[in-house]
Amino acid sequence: PRDKPLPLSFAQQRLWFLQQLEPESAAYNMPAAVRLEGALDVAALKQTFVMLAARHETLRTTFREQGGAPEQVIAAKADIALPLTDLSALPPAQREAEARRIAAAEAARPFDLAAGPLLRARLLKLAADEHMLLVNMHHIISDGWSMSIFTREFAACYRAVAEGHDAGLPPLVLQYADFAAWQRQWLADGELDKQLAYWKEQLGGAQPVLELPADRARPPLQSGRGAVHRWVIGESMTSGVQQLCRAQGSTLFMTLLAAFQVLLHRLSGQGDIRVGVPNANRNRIETENMIGFFVNTQVMRAQVDTRQPFAHLLVQVKDAALGAQAHQDLPFEQLVEALQPERDLSHSPLFQAMFNLMQDDGAARIELPGLVLSPVTGDDGTTHFDLSLDVVERQGRLEAALSYSTDLFDPASVQRFAAYYTNLLQAVVAAPGTSVGHLPMLDADEYRLLTKDWANGEAVPTSLPLLHQSFEAQAVATPDAIALVYEDEEISYAALNVRANRLAHHLIASGIGAEARVGIRMERGPDMIVAILATLKAGGAYVPLDPNYPQERLAFMMEDASIALLLDGPVACQGQPAHNPGVAVHGAQLAYVMYTSGSTGKPKGVAMIHAAVAAHAAVARGFNSLQPHDRVLQFSTFSFDGFVEQLFPALTCGAAVVLRGPVLWDSEELYQRILRHRITAADFTTAYWFQVVQDWAVQGAREFGALRQVSIGGEAMPPEGLKAWRAAGLSHVGLLNTYGPTEAAVAAMSLDCAAYVQYRLPHPVQMPIGRALGGRAIYLLDADKNPVPIGAAGELCIGGALLARGYHGRPELTAERFIPDPFGEEGARLYRTGDLARWKIDGEIEYLGRIDHQVKIRGFRIELPEIEAALLAHPAVREAIVLVREDRPGDKRLVAYLTAQGQAPEMDNLRRHLASGLPDYMVPSAFVLLEVMPMNPNGKLDRKALPAPAYGSGEEQVAPRNDAE
Ligand code: AMP
Ligand code: MG
């Protein structure tokens, strides 16, 4: 009965809600255009629309709201207007363009679901014998299949009217509204639960969002704007794909889908790949000839195991496809409701990429009485998904199209994705037994860029004089030049060399030689520098020991490094000779062991060799353009690698090193010191620089004396720092963003910020970290050691000769992080940094974050698991999680979350417990005691659900109930 309110189908209902959210959106329009060549009978055309509207209720349907919910209303008849625009008077060259402009405007005009009609038509006259017919339906009454019905019946009706006979269309026994009512009933009768159970099992509890390498950040609301890239997969490859299908017992759909899932896996780095696939959903005879919204979407999930051959993935895809077919009646909307009731409008729910193997309906040209009808193809400029692959097989070739959200992607990126897809197909056709992780995907040109042209820094000589040798040469060349400045004390090269020589002789006499570790536990000052140089001259390796560290930690480091001797103050060695000891030292010998936080709960010692630091000193002299007249600030903490970069480049070229005192300078003190000591070059942790430069900016533009060069590094550079840099009057001072782990001899990459400073480019989301420095090769690799494509996230791996030997006394950890270099010479190694980064299209690298739980706080490198291990060692702690939170912008703090073992631990007691083994920068500033740790539906810790502690005493105690329990 049509006189009562009629329910909507589930699909219609969701679309109705979406359209209500954005009434002006044309995202759900289904525009089409056809060219009519020949003598058009306009009256017959009008009559055709009348017949179609009489036949299909959907063309007479509108939607009204009743108490917040929609219902459909079917009119007895619909007035489908057919306005005519005559373009035939325009010059021929302009007609087509004007027609397409009107078509685009018409396609983008929103529908009013309440007013209708939801089919619009418009006729454009291009010439006496040429018209363009624009038809637009709202998706709520139509779908792709419906469009074929519409075209077929349109032709039949026009023919019938023009020739004066019956259209001969089979009668429609039921209408769409009957289907909607039936669907609700059928599902309510138990089918819903049955099908839902399958899909819940198939898709699991967590619904990951596909993270494709986008060119722009995802907007909070999808705009629906899109574009298409089309290409053709030629005959020979198409037949290869078909052969593969036959050999593997799969369909073309399965093979193409599996290859698409591999592509998405490679682009995202994700293993759990979900792709939406439309299902015509016309498997009942009654619905076959209806115009209406039937198409259903199914989610095809693949769990990509890269060690398995492609053929195995194909089996998985086949199972998923057969399972989906057996459970195809569950409306997608119901699935969304069940799995992801909380909607995030920045992406489509459950899947973000779509695949469609379309039927070649052959309807390219239709002959009508006196008229030839052919489709006008074009891109309607919309898409609902991040990326959709449509393929149609036509005349032995595969015509492919990638539609993409222009919110996210540039055309060039999608063009590359298309090439990757073709390359992957080619690879699986050639060898379907290849493991998924080894399928070649990149074009040869891109591969060469990513593994050679962009990857390699400049070559550096491998056998340079070692650090102390270059220093000794300077002491001869410029004996009176100032080597060290400390407060008011100035020490010449000759004097410093003599002091170092005397101590070196003493060390040699004490048995220090190749590979012997010498602990240096001193505050910064000339004695510390003397101790370092003396150790190197003696052939030993120094181990920096920060006297401010807790005793327990220092004891561990000394023990772990098995130091042969500890220097913790000036040594009386006036009796020792003043000349260079001239010990033969080889470049492969150990120069220092530097401890950094360790994820297993104990610090690990990075064992650095002479040749690497000597080469890096040369590289750093280069990027800082150091000259003998330079005065370089030595600022970094002794126990961190920055220290090395601030000392040796200067001492190996005759420049002066200005030592900072034990107390960290505030911004004004630093400013005064730059002037007072005539500092020309300085190197800061990014965090300190950012703080200081903002203070300086408040003072307005000032003179900075002789300062000409600043390098920063240690963590991601905030682009806002550049604004402050300019405001402080520093635009003329060189600024480098350097990147590098302790394991790769300090800075391995750098970005000259000049372009960003000078040209006031629009601020990028991230400041890049630039390119490889001399002697390094930088690769961004996926878990299978493939170079990731431009734009995709990969682990930053450092090759070249400037690497540490490994972790002192930790062969397993060394083997895990220092791996064979697949792109280098025989025996070459790569250090896996654990950093995530991506290539920009210009060959610079952008830092994205960490793979693990290593963090930086105030420039200090911390493995959070080390703090957790220390907490767990406390008897009253059952579970412990430590996070870095930035609840206030720019204010990073460590927060510990705990559950108690029996009696709740005293916070003060916990703090003391941690401080006995950890340096103060590793002691959390707040502790939060929880009853239970929050879990996500997969039973994993839900880090995002950990509450922000209040600011204040640092002894916050919150005990929220865990909703998951
Ligand atoms: P460290 O061994 O103390 O030098 O720390 C090295 C780590 O600090 C790297 O692996 C990165 O995670 C981070 N890092 C260093 N420099 C930068 C930078 N310029 N931008 C982003 N992260 C950086
Ligand atoms: Mg570093």
Image (cartoon, rainbow, N blue to C red):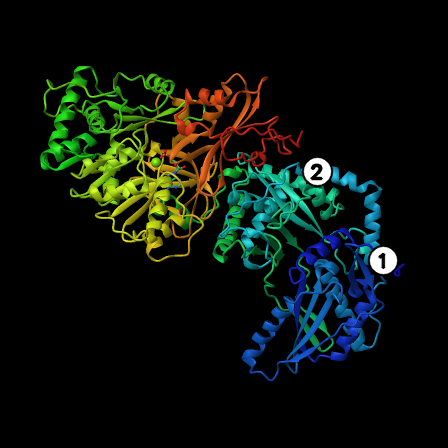
Q: Residue 466 location, x and y as percent? A: 20, 31
Q: How many marks?
A: 2
**First along the sequence among labels 1 and 2:** 1
Q: Amino acid at mark 1?
A: Pro
- Disc 2: which residue: 200
Q: Residue 235 location, x and y as percent? A: 56, 55
Q: Residue 910 location, x and y as percent? A: 49, 21
Toward the viewer: 89 or 338? 338
Residue found at the far top of this picture: 510
Which residue is found at the position 77% from the left and 73% from the top?
Answer: 158
**SS for callout 2:** helix
Which residue is found at the position 63% from the left and 66% from the top?
Answer: 108
Quadrant where the image shows the N terminus: bottom right
Q: Residues within 10 Å of mark 2 (few under 14, many from 20)?
A: few
Q: Amino acid at mark 2?
A: Lys
Classify residue 804 as left or right of residue 244. left
As displayed, is residue 482 above or below residue 544?
below
- Disc 1: which residue: 5
The answer to whether residue 927 is visible is: yes
The answer to whether residue 285 is visible is: no
Q: Quadrant of ligand 2?
A: top left
Which residue is found at the position 24% from the left and 43% from the top?
Answer: 674
Q: Residues within 10 Å of mark 1 (few under 14, many from 20)?
A: some
Quadrant where the image shows the C terminus: top right
